[in-house]
Amino acid sequence: MSAATTRSRTPDRLCAEAVDLARAAAEEAAAPGVVGEHAGVVSEGDRVVTHFFECVELGYRGWRWAVTVARASRAKIVTVDEVVLLPGSDAVLAPEWVPWSERLRPGDMGPGDLLPTDAEDPRLEPGYSGEDEPAPNSAVSGEMAELAESEDADVTAGPPRNLPTVPSRGSIASVAEELGMRRARVLSRYGLRLAAERWEEAFGPRTPMAQAAPASCASCGFLVPICGSLGQAFGICANEFSPADGRVVSLGYGCGGHSEAAVMPRPPQPAPPVIDETRVDPFPLRPAQDSGSVPVTDDETAELGHS
């Protein structure tokens, strides 16, 4: 085996210690602030070592800066051979594809966005059951078929504000709306349970606010009842000072703003004054004649007024 084909697997000590030299070379070749932490060192041969640094530049996830340094035989000065940007093991692989329905999170929708629902969405079910299904020759059944077909479309054409919302008079849609069958699908039991679990997690009896509350929402005067099956366990808070104002809350939820938890006492009424300063008491200057006292003359009265 020739000496040209033999390589030392142990990195050269001086070359392996030249981390600062390799970093300076990488920062000189790259833009400022895109050279990350030192990611390791690999021996390329006798007195030839490659240092790897993480690339923190956007769009280059998993890439690394590779700086190769070397030194001559019996020399103690390490020099830079080359600086390149190389992809790592997971850099050229695209991330696993996730369907949009699994990537969507609450709050992602904005004005003008449309959220199509699957035709087999388990949260929804037909708006009528088989027991009250109209007769085959009924005009309403055809309209229900059209509504079901419209639900199968991926995206409804046009923005929601431009869609017709009021059916024309005498049309099949108007008859269906009059009979209360305008909605092709309604919430299923599964959809109701998901909504109940989601609401109870945010404003339920197990939250820290409810645990410290003096009473539950079931006895609060600010609770607005809701109809339907969900009304047996939920309501809407109407207390503007409550953290759940305008939110659907569980009847077991509670907060410090309960209407009957702390009733403000009436302001105390002041005691009547001992001396009524708002009333004028008459004080006659001339005593009564029948009291037996000496009458006061006019001269004495004038003197009293000047004194």
Image (tube, rainbow, N blue to C red):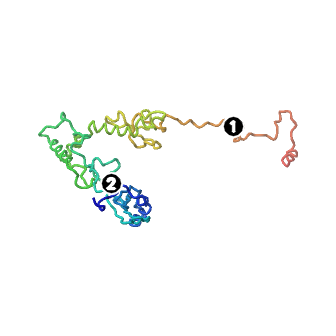
10 Å neighbourhood of mark 1: few (<14), some, or many (≥20)?
Answer: few
Q: Which amino acid type corresponds to the residue marked 1 in the rendered image?
A: Pro
In the depicted view, which residue is nearer to us: 240 or 86? 86
Q: Earlier in the sequence, mark 2 or mark 1?
A: 2
Residue 111: mark: 2
* Dot 2 and dot 1 residues touching (CB under 8 Å): no
Q: Quadrant of residue 220?
A: top left
Q: Quadrant of residue 191?
A: top left
Above or below, 205 against 157 in this view is above
Q: Residue at x 69, y 42 (%)?
A: 278
Q: Residue at x 20, y 49 (%)?
A: 153
- Cα distance in 3D space between marks 2 and 1: 66 Å
SS assignment at label 1? loop
10 Å neighbourhood of mark 2: few (<14), some, or many (≥20)?
Answer: few
Above or below, 114 against 250 in this view is below
Q: Which amino acid type corresponds to the residue marked 2 in the rendered image?
A: Pro
Q: Position of residue 274 (x, y in %)?
A: 71, 36
Q: Position of residue 71 (x, y in %)?
A: 40, 64
Q: Residue at x 35, y 40 (%)?
A: 198
Above or below, 194 against 58 in this view is above
Q: Position of residue 181 (x, y in %)?
A: 22, 41
Q: Which residue is mark 1?
A: 273
Q: Position of residue 7 (x, y in %)?
A: 32, 58
